[in-house]
Image (cartoon, helix red, strand yellow):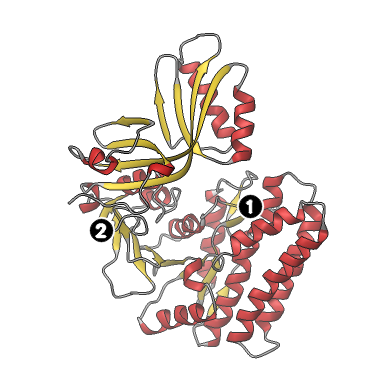
Amino acid sequence: MPEIYKFGGASIKDAEAIRRLGELLSRHDLHPRALVVSAMGKTTNALEALLDAARGDEPGPYRERLEALRDDHLAVAKTLFDSGSAAEADLERLLEELDAAHRAHCDAPYPMHYDQTVGFGELLSTTLVAAWLNEIGLPTRWCDARELIVTDDHHQAAGVDWRETCNRLQTLANEEEALLLTQGFIGATAGGTMTTLGREGSDFSAAILAHCLDAPGLTIWKDVTGVFNADPGRFDNARQLERLSYAEAVEQSWHGAKVIHPRTLAPLQRKAIPLTVRSFLEPGATPSRIGPEPGDGDRQPACILRDDQRLLDISPADFRFMDEACLGEVLGLLARHGLHANYLACEAMRLRLAINDDAAKCAALLADLRGDYRVECREGLTLLTVRHPGDGLLQLLSGDMPVVAEQCSATTAQRLFPSDACPTAWHLPD
């Protein structure tokens, strides 16, 4: 069984990028069993804006955004294919399905309506990519992930029915000789209602396929050469990590490293399937590999930044200890509102949490906490997490910036700073 490949939105952002993808698969003797492809470029953001317009009172903005989405995708089709191509017809059909979904679900709860909207980005992009690969002589079968990945109905973060998903994928793979191409990020309930696996969930989709098909490996193609010990866009001397273990990759993803989606690694680890991260812009460059054994990435310091953080100081209103019952209640509310504790420190009568500053979710959480708890809130913060910090590294990175909160363990150190005090470009000490 050949490997599974996953390509993100940057690799198919326009017609030229789709052509480059076809050349990559043709010229480099690459023979994957299946491709998982994300939405084009900024399409997911455009669909989220379309959703907001659909739930508004004025029909005009919705129609304008839908037409802009249509124009963007049809322009790519017209560049790649002759006028009146089958790809154009397929795109029009999907856009009509999207429009009908808005009419059917406009009064549904937001998470459910979200999934019926945003998942169309991947359906549109894969329609174009499959048509182009067939056009250049790479036999490709477009597969609808809604018929392959079976989930529960937890919209925006659906759980996978592994047994049924494996059955469907294995049946398809046994029947089909062509390259299988499907969508990342989406699935469907057993009844056929579309669901999504969480923002940026296409990596997880690829891991699902690799797990269910017992693939010998999964390769995720990015616009960077691999996994780095810091964001190259924020740190001027970030270094690539050539090898790291599943455990270290999970730690870094959990703390906010953006190269690998946090849910990706567990299904690979269960079957010891190695993950390779490599560049579609520089396919010959040395990639990064993640697997069961530790590597250089398990020892080197790694720095992760999270902006737009909100620090909550939570204390029981009746002067109780912040004991197991209180912790369970507070963390349960956090999960209920879809929030993640990026920083967590507990004292006798105080729990400190740093969370992403999502205004609507934070407001709902605070409403549920107040009454039983006193809550103080500070906004506009940046969280720095350092894995394997070593002696003095955190202090060297912090300089003279004011520290709002901090905690350290043998393997991980964290500090929160006012965002306006942070540098625009960071530098790792030599």
Q: Which mark is residue 413?
A: none
Residue 180 to residue 397: above or below: below
Q: Nearer the viewer, residue 303 or 159?
A: 303
Q: Nearer the viewer, mark 2 or mark 1?
A: 2
Left or right, 66 with respect to 184, comes to right
Between disc 2 and disc 1, whose residue precedes?
A: 1
Q: Residue furthest top?
A: 319
The residue that label 2 is drawn on is 239
Describe residue 326's horizontal placement relative to residue 391 as left or right: right
| One can see residue 114 in this view | yes
Distance CA(mark 2)–CA(mark 1): 37 Å
Task: Name the secondary structure under disc 1.
Answer: strand
User: Callout 1: 10 Å neighbours few (<14), some, many (20+)?
Assistant: many
For residue 344, above or below residue 169: above
User: Whole-percent x and y of residue 77?
Assistant: 62, 81
Residue type beneath disc 1: Thr
**Residue 80 placed where, x, y %?**
58, 85
- Please say whether residue 192 is visible from this viewpoint: no
- Seen at 59% across and 77% down, the residue is 128
In the rendering, which numbered label is found on residue 195? 1
Which residue is at the front of the view, 287 or 237?
A: 237
Describe the element under mark 2 as helix, strand or loop: loop
Frontmost residue, 380 versus 246: 380
Quadrant placement of the N terminus: bottom left
